[in-house]
Amino acid sequence: MPITDPEKKQLAQKARLYMKICFYCGARNSIDAKRCRKCHNKYLRLKNRTLGIKK
Ligand SMILES: [Zn+2]
């Protein structure tokens, strides 16, 4: 099913590329995560990729 709505497409790309990575164990967490789901470390960095977005 192709996504025709450009707003939804942008949202989907953000959801895929904007996530948080744990400093400690490197696990991926959701963008609104307060702490790591794996080791419960609260130091999360933002994975903020602008390159390599597939169309
Ligand atoms: Zn962690």
Image: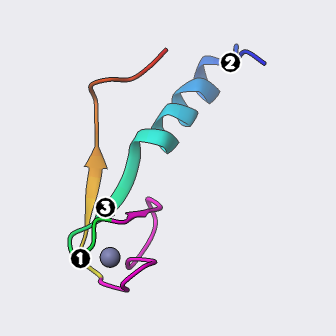
The image quadrant in which ligand 1 is located: bottom left
Tell me the number on the disc at residue 21: 3
Amino acid at the residue labelled 2: Asp
Q: Residue placed at 47% from the left, 61% from the top?
A: 30
Query: What residue appears at the point 59 percent right and 25 percent down from the top-left corner?
Result: 9
In the rendered structure, which disc, 1 or 2, sits on the residue that comes first in sequence? 2
Label 2 residue SS = loop
At horizontal 46% and vertical 77% (from top left) the residue drawn is 37
* Mark 3 → mark 2, Cα distance in angstroms: 29 Å
Please report the bounds of the magenta region as a residue range.
Answer: 27-41
Residue holding disc 2? 5
Kindly indicate the quadrant of the structure image that contains residue 24.
Answer: bottom left
- Give the main secondary structure, helix, strand or loop, of the magenta stretch: loop
Quadrant where the image shows the N terminus: top right
The number of callouts visible is: 3
**Residue 35 - label:** none
Q: Nearer the viewer, residue 54 or 9?
A: 54
- Numbered circle sitting on residue 43: 1
